[in-house]
Image (tube, grey):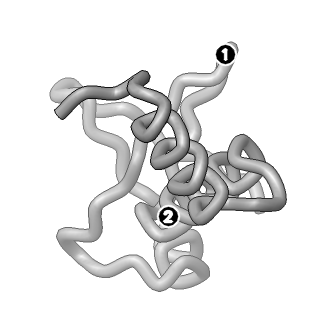
Amino acid sequence: MTEKTRLDANGRVVLPASARRALGLAPGAELAVEVRDDAIVLRTFGASAATAHARVREALGPAGVAGLADELLAQRKQGLWRE
C-alpha cells in the first residue's frame, strides 16, 4: 500500500487512516522512526521489539541466553570478572 501525505510547517506528517487501521494505531500510539538511505521507516514498538529480539537471538546463537549466562559464569570462575 502506497499513499501520499505531506509534511506540515511543524514537521508533522498525518498517517492515512487506512494505514492506521491496518496497524491498529490509535491516537497517542508511539512509533519508532528509522532513517534508512533515502527513506523514513516508521515501526510500531511491538514490531521494533520483535526485530531487536530476533537480532539478539541470532547473535547469541543456538545456546541463547542460557549459553551466554554459562559463558559469563565460566569466565567469572576463571577470574576474568571481578565483583
Image point 44% across, 40% down: which residue? 77
Between residue 37 and residue 47, name the one nearer to us. 47
> What is the quadrant of residue 7 in the picture?
top left
Residue nearest the viewer, comparing 53 with 14: 53
Crowd tier of the residue under label 1, counting other residues whose Cα lies within 10 Å: few below 14, some 14–19, many 20 or above: few
**What secondary structure is found at the residue carrying circle 2?**
loop
Which residue is labeled 2 in the image? 16
Quadrant location, the C terminus? top left
Question: Mark 2 near mark 1, Cβ–Cβ under 8 Å?
Answer: no
Q: Residue at x 42, y 22 (%)?
A: 80
The x and y percentages for residue 60 are: 70, 47
Residue 9 coordinates in the image, percent (x, y): 21, 25
| Of pointers 2 and 1, the one earlier in the residue sequence | 2
Rendered location of residue 38, percent (x, y): 67, 16
**Quarter of the figure with the N terminus:** bottom right
Residue at the far top in the pictured view: 37
Which residue in the rendered view is the most extreme toward the right?
Answer: 62
In what element is the residue under mark 1?
loop
Indicate left or right for 18 with 77 as reference: right
User: Looking at numbered disc 1 in the image, what kind of residue is underneath it?
Assistant: Asp
What residue type is disc 2 on? Pro
Q: Residue beneath label 1, please?
A: 38
Cα distance in 3D space between marks 2 and 1? 21 Å
